[in-house]
Image (cartoon, rainbow, N blue to C red):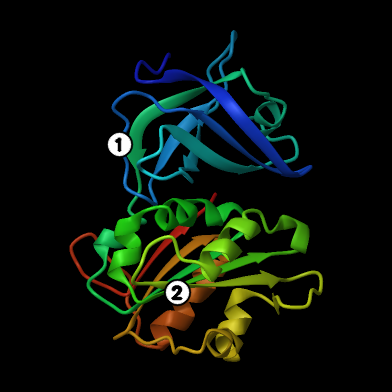
Amino acid sequence: MKDDRSVSCPIIWRRDWTPWLFSFGTTRPAGLDFTPGQFVRIAMPTTDGEPVWRAYSIASSPAAEELEFYSIVVPDGPFTQPLSRSRVGDRVLVDPTVYGFLRTDRFTAARHLWLLATGTGIAPFLSMLADEAVWRRFERIVVVHSVRRPVELAYRDLLETRAARAPFDGCRLDYRPTLTAEHEIGSLEGRITDLLVDGRLERSVGIDLSPDDSRLMLCGNPSMIKQMRVLLGASGFAPVRRDTPGHYISENFW
């Protein structure tokens, strides 16, 4: 059955980070408004059978004229394989309905915002960091991006530039690339959960994680998120619920 809400949008640019990681931009359907951290469903057009829909976080600014997405290529994936072969001028279907509760406006006031991502889970945080309203809410923003190898640190240049020179006054960004399979001078080594347990993450930034001062967002590997929930709960952090304030929000990236 055809999704009557879908809009056919051309791909207007593409960047390949590795053979298995790439970003691309499409035109933005008229009337599509979103809050940084939210996602839409996209699909490849098909002439036979139903399109395969997948949820993709929007990586672009809510003020941008385009939509930006960041994708991994899943071996034999029914969606990412044809998507990985797409080029500028090809089209994708975009359902303009937005979803998701990974939004900073769900937090009560705090001094520090921690954005913890694995792999392509960095995408929604890129949208947040392009939004002035997010920078105005906090004194410090800490971005932790965990990948296996340095080559997988997509958007590193952008994040390092913003850490060196914040785009908006009133807030400082700390960027901590984290590697789990290779060594690199200047990057942390180990899983995010291990870095939290042994204190290396907090020491590297110079601030403590506390329920009073800190709000956290977790996005990426379900295993990381499951372990982080246990660790945060043991330290007095509570998840944000639909009608209940809390200290952290999490979203699995598959």
Tell me the amino acid under the disc marked 1: Asp
Residues 74 and 144: in front is 144
**On the image, numbered disc 1 is attached to which residue?**
33
* Residue visible at 26% across and 67% down in the picture: 107
Q: Earlier in the sequence, mark 2 or mark 1?
A: 1
Q: What crowding class fits label 1: few (fewer than 14 Cα within 10 Å), some (14-19), or many (20 or more)?
A: few
Could one spot residue 206 in this view of the protein? yes
Could one spot residue 103 in this view of the protein? no
Q: Is residue 38 above or below residue 142?
A: above
Give percent across and percent down for residue 44: 57, 22
Q: Secondary structure at mark 1?
A: loop
Give percent across and percent down for residue 221: 58, 60
Q: CA distance from mark 2 to mark 1?
A: 30 Å
* Residue visible at 46% across and 79% down in the picture: 230
Q: Secondary structure at mark 2?
A: helix
Query: Which quadrant is home to the N terminus?
Result: top left
